[in-house]
């Protein structure tokens, strides 16, 4: 993603978040290109509101995607190209991950506009 | 935080999450020590369930802390030592941040136990 605009421009709550925490295995093994494609593909889905992502030098990362409904999240989870990526995620790219689906109730911010 | 155990061991939902996305200014300026202290202090608060954190090379990071109630989140936000850190966060450390408070409704994971 473009690091100069790392924040999602979400609307006023309520909306939904998928918090995806993951530890990568070593080596790229095709991960980078697919990760980039998944952000692009997600952003084309109905109900997509935005995404934020950070991964540190140890291979631990957090990606939070924002959606307008649980239905939109379910549809994204079962998108065919995304299902293929999920399968590769388990087989090749991730050592461990946690997925948490949450309803955002309140939000505030600090700092310059982007 | 200990990168060998980067995942929070949260209980079965529902519980609450504070999603803190931030862009750091350049230079440490005392940030590292206070960030470490805030993780320690948060973990001593009533209702704290765990925390996950990743920051990339560009200075963009996501920290998600997990709590058993909105009351626990409110109490943490108004903790005196945390209030001082928040003030320094605006004055010295962060260019921009977003805080989103969410109720985790569902969770699942993949991979080895930690």
Image: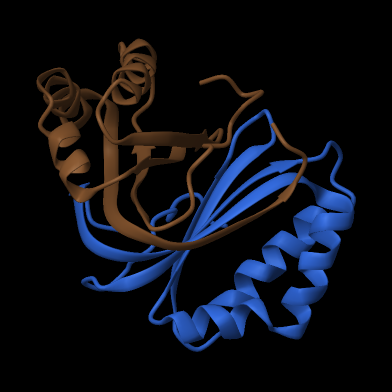
Chain colours: A brown, B blue
Q: Residue at x 36, y 17 (%)?
A: A40
Q: Residue furthest front?
A: A12
Query: In the drawing, does residue B61 fall left or right of residue B47?
Result: right
Q: Quadrant of residue A61?
A: top left
Question: Residue A33, percent across and down?
Answer: 36, 10
| Residue A102, placed above or below residue A73 | below
Question: Residue B22, percent across and down?
Answer: 65, 46
| Residue B16, placed above or below residue B32 | below
In the rendered picture of this protein, how many numbered marks are placed on residues?
0
Is residue B55 visible in the rendered structure shown here? yes
Is residue B44 visible in the rendered structure shown here? no
Q: Nearer the viewer, residue A4 or B82?
A: A4
Q: Nearer the viewer, residue A82 or A88?
A: A82
Q: Residue at x 76, y 66 (%)?
A: B86
Query: In the drawing, does residue A7 fall left or right of residue B13?
Result: right
Q: Quadrant of residue B25?
A: top right
Query: In the drawing, does residue A57 fall left or right of residue A22?
Result: right
Question: Residue A87, percent across and down?
Answer: 13, 27
Question: Residue A15, percent across and down?
Answer: 36, 52
Q: Nearer the viewer, residue A32 or A94?
A: A32
Q: Residue at x 30, y 64 (%)?
A: B104
| Residue A40, placed above or below residue B68 | above
Rendered-image quadrant of the N terminus of chain B: bottom right
Q: Quadrant of residue B76?
A: bottom right
Rendered-image quadrant of the C terminus of chain B: bottom left
Q: Residue at x 68, y 82 (%)?
A: B78
| Residue A30, placed above or below residue A35 | above
């Amino acid at each position: 993603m473009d690091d100069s605009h790392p924040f999602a421009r979400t609307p006023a709550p309520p909306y939904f978040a998928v918090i995806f925490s993951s530890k990568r295995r070593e080596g790229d093994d095709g991960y980078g290109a697919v990760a980039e494609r998944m952000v692009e593909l997600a952003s084309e889905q109905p109900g997509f509101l935005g995404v934020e992502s950070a991964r540190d030098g140890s291979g631990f990362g957090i990606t939070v995607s924002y959606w307008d409904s649980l239905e939109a999240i379910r549809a994204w989870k079962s998108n065919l190209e995304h299902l293929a990526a999920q399968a590769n995620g388990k087989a090749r790219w991730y050592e461990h991950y946690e997925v948490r689906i949450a309803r955002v109730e309140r939000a505030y911010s600090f700092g310059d506009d982007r």
